[in-house]
Image (cartoon, rainbow, N blue to C red):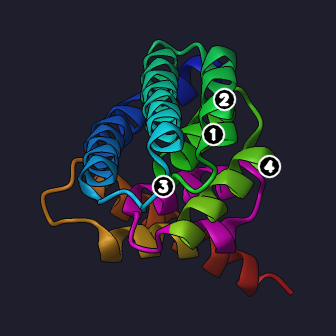
Amino acid sequence: MRRTDKRRSVIPLAIVVTALGGMLLSLLLSREAEQPATVQPAAAAGAHEFLDDERARRVHQGFQQGVAMLQAGEFEYAVTALHEVLAIQPALPEAHVNMGFALLGAGEPGAATDFFNTATDLRPSLHNAYYGLALAERENGNDRAALAAMQAYTHLAAENERHLERAKEFIWELQAKTRGEGDTP
């Protein structure tokens, strides 16, 4: 598959992931702001709030930069921005998903697999992580793992999901391929 072909399949999915990630990130940041602070001395509490606000701002800004770079096909820059986000907020599954798509676009499906797996570990219901995992596993030559990941995606995705038909075609092709492999002596 040529590099431009990868971009055509990765970028639309990245846009969907970005929209979901942005919504979830906003929800995460708004929840953090609503939670009552623990009791601390007045001076320390002010410094702590500033650090939390700065941390949240840096995560949000880095995430948005990473997504913009991913959408623009600038995969190496997306990797850099998302790496910074994950250094601050390592348990943010949306950042792991976007990092996976950035690495996949950069031609590193092995590393992408690790990030997609981490995203599914952090949030097992994150269906786009399974879609990306399927693409990465197929690039790695792991057809059975790709098939399992795409089946998980189709089970978790909403009926009106944009990529659902493409996912079903992917499954059909891999099922035919894996059946064919089993038929040879």
User: In screen coordinates, is 132 left or right of 83?
Assistant: left
Is 78 placed above or below 123 here? Answer: above
Looking at the rendering, which quadrant does residue 138 occupy? bottom right
Please tell me which residue is depicted at 46% across the width and 30% down the height of the picture: 50
For label 3, the residue is 40
Q: Are marks 1 and 2 in contact (CB under 8 Å)?
A: yes
Mark 3 and mark 4: span between their CA atoms? 45 Å
Front position among marks 2 and 4? 2
Instruction: Provide the major secondary structure of the magenta segment.
Output: helix
The numbered mark, 1 or 4, whose residue comes first in the sequence reads 1
User: In screen coordinates, is 85 left or right of 53?
Assistant: right
- SS at circle 3: loop
The numbered mark, 3 or 1, whose residue comes first in the sequence reads 3
Q: Are marks 2 and 4 in contact (CB under 8 Å)?
A: no
Front position among marks 1 and 4? 1
What span is in magenta? 123-147
Mark 1 and mark 2: span between their CA atoms? 7 Å
The amino acid on which the numbered mark 4 sits, given as a three-letter code, is Gly
Please tell me which residue is depicted at 42% across the width and 61% down the height of the picture: 39
**Image position, residue 162 (x, y; %):** 22, 47
Local crowd at mark 2 within 10 Å, few (<14), some, or many (≥20)?
some
Marking on residue 110 = 4
For label 2, the residue is 84
The amino acid on which the numbered mark 3 sits, given as a three-letter code, is Gln
The numbered mark, 2 or 4, whose residue comes first in the sequence reads 2
Looking at the rendering, which quadrant does residue 4 occupy? top right
For label 1, the residue is 88
Mark 3 and mark 1: span between their CA atoms? 23 Å
Front position among marks 3 and 2? 3
Q: Is residue 130 magenta?
A: yes
